[in-house]
Amino acid sequence: MTTTTAPTHRTAPGRPDRLAPLAAGWLGLWGLLALVSAITGAGYPFGANDPRGGEANLLRLVPTDVGPPLFAVLLLGAAVAALAMTGPARRPARPLRTLLLAYAWTVAFLLAVVVPDVEVLTILGYTPILIVGAPFGWPPVDYADVFTWALFARFAAVVGGVLLAGAVLRWQRRIADACPACGRDGTDHGRTTPAPATRWGRVAAWTAATIPALYAVTRLAWALGVPLGIERSFLDEMRESGLVWAGAGLGGFALVGAVLTLGLVQRWGERFPRWMVGLAGRPVPVGLAVVPATLVAVAVTAASLGLLASPDFWDLSAGLSLATAPMLLWPLWGVALGVATYAYHLRRRGACRRCGRG
């Protein structure tokens, strides 16, 4: 009698890992730009040089003459670290391995969460309004004032942080003798199997959906003329300036996000519903849900850190109200959405194309 076993990642024909070189190239490019900025004294978009003031960004604490060389060192060092993670999976000595992992994960966190602040989440919420309203000249904004170099640098930081995190995770799996693509090592780890992931993923998904829904209620109430959590005079000012409609756009974005979050634990999040002509009944690609949900989780976490680090926010929320209370829950929102997305990934990932496990 002949038995067959699934190939492991050592014997399966695997593609070379392109993530680490890609991360190294991206970080190296921006590291060189930071070095040029340090030499010329121009182009640094954070702190006092931020056109929007940057009060909701911890980089306001870094002097503008220190920021460029600091970024150059961090980015170029991270590029070298990413390059060290390419090639054959050699396991370095424990002290060097610990140092490399600690440095790379720290830089990835700084780039993906500390640098972006609330601007990235805000523009994600406003972009649909800006696109739809552009042909009609509404909202009356100068797009050059919206899509600035500082905003572009924030998005570039998020991309660099996510690429570096992915490269580090893959390398960490490789040196642990696990599949770099899926992380499986042939051992049943209990809580990461589909059944347990369904249970804790459901709790996380409902938590991640409730918080933005609470935020949406206040902003949509203002659009309807209900001063929920604010003074009537303040609402009148926002209606006169048109700011209330921008808030309604963010509220609508949050409400749509809440519904899509529930899709992580609903059947229609696994198979397209019947009303979607041409797609009805087909499986939803895992990446179609996981990639945007992960990016939103990162953006929400960055926004929450920026808000909680802003003195202006604490001045505003000194008298805690329905207007500000939902934003105090944003750190939980980001974490819960990340956990729910991971649970969805565990339930839907199936067999790994690289190692055959699963």
Image (cartoon, rainbow, N blue to C red):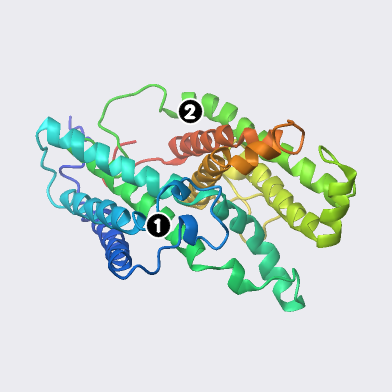
Between 82 and 2, the residue placed more toward the observer is: 82
Taking the spot 12% from the left edge, 48% from the top edge, the residue there is 88
The percent position of residue 5, horizontal first and vertical second, equals 22, 35
Secondary structure under the numbered disc 1 in the rendered image? loop
Give the quadrant of residue 157.
bottom left
The percent position of residue 310, horizontal first and vertical second, equals 57, 42
Taking the spot 78% from the left edge, 42% from the top edge, the residue there is 218
Q: Residues within 10 Å of mark 2 (few under 14, many from 20)?
A: many
Quadrant of the snapshot with the N terminus? top left
Q: Nearer the viewer, mark 1 or mark 2?
A: 1
The percent position of residue 106, horizontal first and vertical second, equals 32, 41
Give the quadrant of residue 21.
bottom left
Q: How many numbered marks appear? A: 2
Give the quadrant of residue 265.
top right
Q: Which residue is mark 2?
A: 197
Q: Amino acid at mark 2?
A: Ala
Q: Amino acid at mark 1?
A: Thr
Taking the spot 84% from the left edge, 54% from the top edge, the residue there is 237
Q: Which residue is mark 1?
A: 64
Whether residue 341 sits left or right of residue 12 in the image: it is right
Secondary structure under the numbered disc 2 in the rendered image? helix
The residues bearing labels 1 and 2 have C-alpha atoms spaced at a distance of 45 Å
